Amino acid sequence: MKRIKQVNESKEMIYKALMDLLLEKNLEDITMTEIAKKAQVVRMTLYRHFKEKEDIILFGFDRNLSKVLDAMKKKENPTLMDLLVLRFKILQESPYTNILAKNHKLDKLFQTIGARNIHHFSDILPKVSTPYENAFIAGGIDTLTKLWIENGMKESYKDIATEVLDIIYRLKVL
């Protein structure tokens, strides 16, 4: 138990150090050595937890996403629209989305959103008959999301969630 606490504290220190450095310079101008020094950890500790700077950002994103998803789980009878709105709201309001997009790490971001957290809501997701259909739907949503982010997230999170749901129903995918 003590080891888990120590690992979590190290990760938090590293995350905070990167966030502080991002106030001063762009991500591409920050080195892992600078992050370790600012966090007051040795580089080996930094690399034990994170392979690259974007992984530190994903750690922060995942931590915040978990809090929001926990609150969503408490909602009575959530719908697919609720999940889509949540997805796009988190992305639009997060300071990390543009940083990850600029550094070509959106695929890692989608893995964080999907694989680690969506299992909480398997009971409200539409049932599809094959894993291929599931992959098709997920891939389509990720591709649309990536395009929306790359186009500057001009539509509100509610509008883009509605667009996704309209496409799904128009194509009679679900």
Image: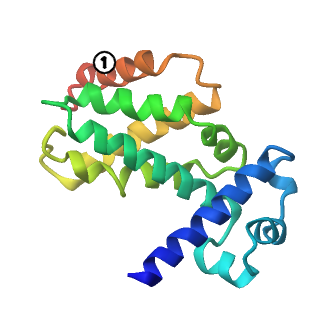
Coordinates of residue 79 in the picture (x, y in percent): 20, 29
At horizontal 51% and vertical 70% (from top left) the residue drawn is: 8
Coordinates of residue 50 in the picture (x, y in percent): 62, 71
Disc tally is: 1
Q: Is residue 116 left or right of residue 95?
A: left
Check disc 1 and give the amino acid type. Asp
Relative to 161, say whether 133 is above or below.
Answer: below
Relative to 133, say whether 80 is above or below.
Answer: above
Relative to 73, say whether 115 is above or below.
Answer: below
Q: Is residue 58 left or right of residue 104?
A: left
At horizontal 67% and vertical 50% (from top left) the residue drawn is: 104
Seen as rendered, the residue at the extreme front is 2
Coordinates of residue 117 in the picture (x, y in percent): 33, 52
Instruction: Return the residue nearer the eye: 30 or 100.
Output: 30
Which residue was labeled with disc 1? 166
Instruction: Return the residue nearer the eye: 138 or 34.
Output: 34
- How many other residues sit within 10 Å of disc 1, few (<14), some (14-19) or many (≥20)? few
At horizontal 72% and vertical 43% (from top left) the residue drawn is: 102
> The C terminus lies in which quarter of the figure?
top left
Relative to 118, say whether 91 is above or below.
Answer: above
Q: Is residue 105 left or right of residue 167?
A: right
At horizontal 69% and vertical 43% (from top left) the residue drawn is: 99
Coordinates of residue 154 in the picture (x, y in percent): 59, 17
| Residue 146, image quadrant | top right
> The N terminus lies in which quarter of the figure?
bottom left
